[in-house]
Image (tube, rainbow, N blue to C red):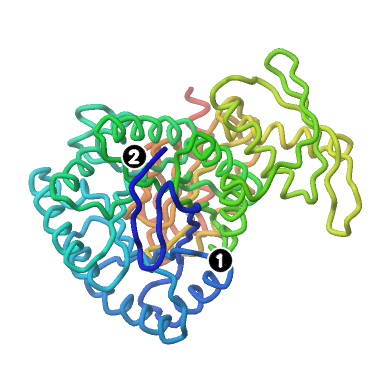
C-alpha cells in the first residue's frame, strides 16, 4: 500500500522505505542509568526506534537526560515518548523527543475537550518537527467511540480516522498510525479497515503493526508472526514491534526476521507443500528450531486466519544447536507447532490463551516472573483466556479479550479481574494465584 513518508529523527518510515523495527524499554524512566544501559543494548541489537514511557510531566526531565547521555555516546536512535492520558505530559515532552505516541481519545472524558487538546499537541509537534503515532488499542477506546460502534475492529478504525482527519485538516503529516490487540483476528480486521478508510480519504499514513500483549516463548513469537505477517503479506505495515514479556532486546531478532522476509531479503525454509482439500502437509529443511517456528507461522498464519486452511501438518528436519538434523514429525515438534499455529490464528484452543503485556516504566512488579508463575499454575485449564498485566493504569482496558485478569498494583499487591470487573483488590502477590484459581474453579462449577 502506497503511503506518505514520515521522518522520525534520521529514520524514514513509509512504503518506499525498508520496514523499520523497534522495541520499548521496560525500565523505570526515572532510573536514568538503567534506561540508558537498556537503550545501549537495544541499539547494539539493531533497534531503529526506541520507545520509553513518560508517565508524568516530572519524567520529562528524565527522558531529556536519557537522550542527552545517548547522544553524547554517539547513539542516535530516535526516541519515542509513550504517553497515556495526559496531554500536558505530551506537550511538555514533544520538543525533546523525535516522536510521541498517544491515544488522543484518552486525553479527556469530554470528547470535545480531547479534540482541543489534540489540536494543541499537533501545533507543538509541528513547531518542533516531532512526529506522532496515533496508537489505539482494543479495549481502551473510550466511551465516545464504543457507544457508537461497540468494542470492535470497526470502532478501532473509525476512532483512528477521526484523529487522522484532524491531522489532515491541520496540514500535519508527520503521522504514523497503529491499531493493536492481543487477538490476531481483531488486529488483522482493524488494520484492513483502517487501510481502506485512509485510501478512500486519499491520504495514507504509514502503519505501525504488531500484536500487543502476545506473551513470551514460542507462543509469543508464533502469535506475533501470525498477525504481523498476515498484514505485511498484504502490503500493510511500515514499522513493526514484536511485543514479548521478556527482555525487550529479545524482540528484535524476531522483528528483524519479519522485516527481512517481507523486504525480500530472506526466504522460507519450506521445501514442499502438498494440499489435500483444506489441509496442508508442509516439508521444511530449517536451519534451526526457531527458524522453523517463524517460517511456519508466516507461511500458514494468513491462510489459517482467513480460513483457507483448517489443518497443517509438518515433515522434514530442522537443525539443533550442534547442527545435527532433527526429524520434525518424530521429535513431536510437528504436532506441537500445528497446535500453536491453530491457537494463534484463533481456530482451535488446546491450552489456556494468555494475554501478557511486555512491561514498561509503569510496571511496579516482576511481571516476567509473575507471568511464568501464572502459566505454571493454570496450564491444565482449557477454554479460558487469562491476562497478566503490568499496571493498573492500562491493564484493565487492554485485556479486552480476557476472561480473567491478574494486574499488578505495585507494593506486592495484585488486583484480580473477571472480564473488565475487579473482583478482588490489594491481594498480596504471595496469595494472588491461589485466589485466581479459586475464582476460576468456582466459576466453572457454577457454569
Question: Relative to residue 1, is residue 81 drawn left or right?
Answer: left
Give the residue number, with chain letter if any, for mark 1: 46
Question: Relative to residue 410, is residue 312 drawn left or right?
Answer: right
| Residue 352, position as x, y percentages in the image | 59, 36
Position of 227 relative to 15 (above/below) = above
Q: Name the residue: 55% across, 49% down.
A: 215
Question: Relative to residue 317, is residue 90 drawn left or right?
Answer: left
Count of all numbered marks drawn on residues in the image: 2
Q: Secondary structure at mark 1?
A: loop
Snapshot quadrant of residue 403: top left
Sequence order check: which comes first, mark 1 or mark 2?
1
| Residue 355, position as x, y percentages in the image | 50, 44
| Residue 17, position as x, y percentages in the image | 46, 53
Give the residue number, with chain letter if any, for mark 2: 139
Q: Name the residue: 40% across, 31% down.
A: 192
Position of 353 relative to 248 (above/below) = above
Q: Name the residue: 62% across, 58% down.
A: 253
**Viewport quadrant of the N terminus:** top left
Question: Relative to residue 232, is residue 123 drawn left or right?
Answer: left
Distance from disc 1 to disc 2, alpha carbons, whole Å, reads 31 Å
Residue sitting at the far top = 277
Amino acid at each position: 500500500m502506497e503511503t506518505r513518508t514520515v521522518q522520525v529523527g534520521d529514520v524514514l518510515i513509509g512504503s518506499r522505505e525498508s520496514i523499520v523495527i523497534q522495541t520499548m524499554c521496560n525500565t523505570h524512566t526515572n532510573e536514568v542509568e538503567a534506561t540508558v544501559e537498556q537503550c545501549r543494548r537495544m541499539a547494539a541489537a539493531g533497534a531503529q526506534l526506541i520507545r520509553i514511557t513518560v508517565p508524568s510531566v516530572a519524567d520529562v526531565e528524565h527522558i531529556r537526560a536519557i537522550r542527552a547521555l545517548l547522544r553524547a555516546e554517539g547513539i542516535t536512535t530516535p526516541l519515542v515518548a509513550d504517553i497515556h492520558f495526559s496531554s500536558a505530559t505530551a506537550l511538555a515532552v514533544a520538543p525533546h523527543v523525535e516522536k510521541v505516541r498517544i491515544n488522543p481519545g484518552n486525553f479527556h472524558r469530554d470528547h470535545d475537550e480531547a479534540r482541543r487538546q489534540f489540536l494543541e499537541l499537533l501545533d507543538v509537534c509541528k513547531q518542533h518537527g516531532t512526529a506522532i503515532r496515533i496508537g489505539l488499542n482494543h479495549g481502551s477506546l473510550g466511551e465516545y467511540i464504543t457507544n457508537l460502534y461497540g468494542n470492535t475492529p470497526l470502532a478501532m478504525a473509525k476512532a483512528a480516522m477521526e484523529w487522522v482527519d484532524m491531522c489532515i485538516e491541520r496540514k500535519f503529516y508527520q503521522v504514523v498510525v497503529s491499531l493493536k490487540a492481543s487477538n490476531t483476528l481483531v488486529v488483522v480486521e482493524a488494520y484492513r479497515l483502517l487501510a481502506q478508510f485512509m485510501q478512500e480519504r486519499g491520504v495514507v499514513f504509514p502503519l505501525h503493526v504488531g500484536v500487543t500483549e502476545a506473551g513470551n516463548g514460542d507462543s509469543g513469537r508464533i502469535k506475533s508472526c501470525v498477525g504481523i505477517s498476515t498484514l505485511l503479506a498484504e502490503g500493510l505495515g511500515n514499522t513493526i514491534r514484536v511485543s514479548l514479556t521478556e527482555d525487550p532486546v529479545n524482540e528484535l531478532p524476531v522483528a528483524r526476521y519479519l522485516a527481512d522476509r517481507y523486504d525480500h531479503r530472506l526466504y522460507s525454509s519450506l521445501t514442499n507443500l502438498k494440499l489435500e482439500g483444506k489441509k496442508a502437509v508442509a516439508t521444511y529443511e530449517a536451519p534451526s528450531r526457531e527458524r522453523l517456528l517463524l517460517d511456519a507461522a508466516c507461511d500458514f498464519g494468513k491462510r489459517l486466519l482467513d480460513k483457507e486452511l483448517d489443518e497443517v501438518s509438518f515433515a522434514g528436519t530442522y537443525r539443533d544447536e550442534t547442527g545435527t538434523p532433527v526429524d520434525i514429525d518424530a521429535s513431536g515438534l510437528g504436532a506441537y507447532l500445528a497446535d500453536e499455529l491453530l491457537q494463534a490464528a484463533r481456530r482451535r484452543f488446546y491450552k489456556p490463551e494468555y494475554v501478557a503485556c511486555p512491561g514498561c516504566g509503569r510496571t511496579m512488579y516482576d511481571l516476567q516472573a509473575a507471568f511464568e508463575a501464572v502459566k505454571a499454575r493454570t496450564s491444565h485449564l482449557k477454554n479460558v483466556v487469562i491476562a497478566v498485566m503490568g499496571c493498573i493504569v492500562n491493564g484493565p482496558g487492554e485485556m479486552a479479550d480476557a476472561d480473567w485478569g491478574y494486574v499488578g498494583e505495585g507494593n506486592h499487591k495484585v488486583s484480580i479481574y473477571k472480564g473488565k470487573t475487579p473482583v478482588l483488590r490489594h491481594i498480596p502477590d504471595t496469595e494472588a494465584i491461589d485466589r485466581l484459581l479459586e475464582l476460576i474453579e468456582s466459576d466453572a462449577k457454577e457454569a
